[in-house]
Image: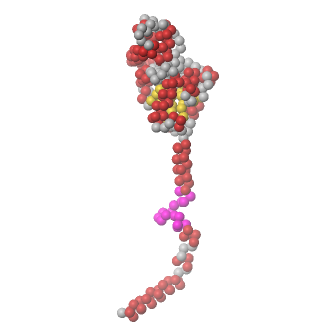
Amino acid sequence: MGCAAGGEAATWAEAVLAHKQATPLHAICKPKKERMRALFQPAGPQVNLWSTRLRAWAALLRLLCLWAVRPLIYLFDIDGTLVTTAGAGRKALCETFRSRYGADHGLQFSFDGMTDKAIVGLALQAMAVPLHEASLADEVERVLESYVNVLASHAQASADAFVIHEGVVAVLDEVQAAGQGVMGLGTGNVRRGAEIKLAAVNLYHRFAFGGFGCDHHDRTALLAVGAARGAALLGKPMGDCDLLVIGDTPKDIAAAHGIGARCLAVATGSYSVEELQAAGGDVCVPRLDHPAAKAALLPYGGV
Ligand SMILES: [Mg+2]
């Protein structure tokens, strides 16, 4: 039995020796360079290590860029900026005054850039309307409650008077698609008035939040309310966001600067580009779809 095993071992040893003599050394032990490469490459299909590393660096760079980007809070004015309503607001307010007080002569001034509360308060004082027991603020509220009902009737009766400015829808589409911030309103209209004017042209649903004329009689204060709502929607502190007000009057510009925002001023209302520049607009353009406006709206590039 043992002899048989010894015979097999001799046969195996002889076979190994014969194989070594017949096979060159580099075929049994791979060169050092190949062994080192094998340590860094996974088994299976060959992977280009440098391209994998570049892709990883690019992904890391993208993550860093996204972390560093400050989201925008857009606050759009309505009248003269997004739409024109052929004076529907003024007509509704005059009708409301005539109905309540028998006259509307206190409203003979420019409404440009004014808030609804400020307009009504000024007119009531100009007409020296007797307030009896009510405070001026209470009377303003009552007037505005009647006003929105009249405005709704005007919007229903003459929908053609409400027109979106050329290029606005395309710009809103681009801003929405780019996803660089949240779109809201910064308007002197009371919320219901804003809804009536924008719903008439199918735009109201485009804005997730806003600062409105019912939030405050002062434009700067209502923009601050709108900006705070935008920051809450983003889930970020206001200080981590950039604010951009889009308006058409020097009052929009002053209010924007009052909350530390930049103002994109468009000459689609009553003021020219030169007048808006003189008022300190940060970017002043003839229309909202002007290339300079798009650059201001999309600071991280378009889609
Ligand atoms: Mg305006």
- How far from the left and from the top, in percent, is residue 82? 50, 25
Above or below, 174 relative to 148: below
- How far from the left and from the top, in percent, is residue 199? 41, 24
Q: Is residue 171 left or right of residue 4?
A: right
Residue at coordinates 49% horizontally, 64% vertically from top-left?
42
Above or below, 221 relative to 6: above
Residue in the foreground of this view, choosing between 271 and 259: 259
How many marks the image carries: the answer is 0
Q: Is residue 42 magenta?
A: yes
Residue 26 visible within the image: yes
- How far from the left and from the top, in percent, is residue 66? 52, 43
Above or below, 61 relative to 279: below
- How far from the left and from the top, in percent, is residue 54? 56, 54
Q: Is residue 113 magenta?
A: no
Quadrant (top left/top right/bottom left/bottom right) for the N terminus: bottom left
The colour scheme applied to this rendered structure is secondary structure
Residue sitting at the far front: 133
Residue sitting at the far left: 1
The residues colored magenta run 37-52
Based on the displayed image, in which of its 4 quarters is residue 243 positioned? top right
Residue 164 visible within the image: no
Based on the displayed image, in which of its 4 quarters is residue 249 positioned? top right
Residue in the foreground of this view, choosing between 258 and 194: 258
Residue at coordinates 53% horizontally, 14% vertically from top-left?
110
Above or below, 136 relative to 16: above
Residue at coordinates 56% horizontally, 30% vertically from top-left?
261
Residue at coordinates 45% horizontally, 90% vertically from top-left?
10
Residue in the foreground of this view, choosing between 153 and 132: 132
Residue sitting at the far top: 102
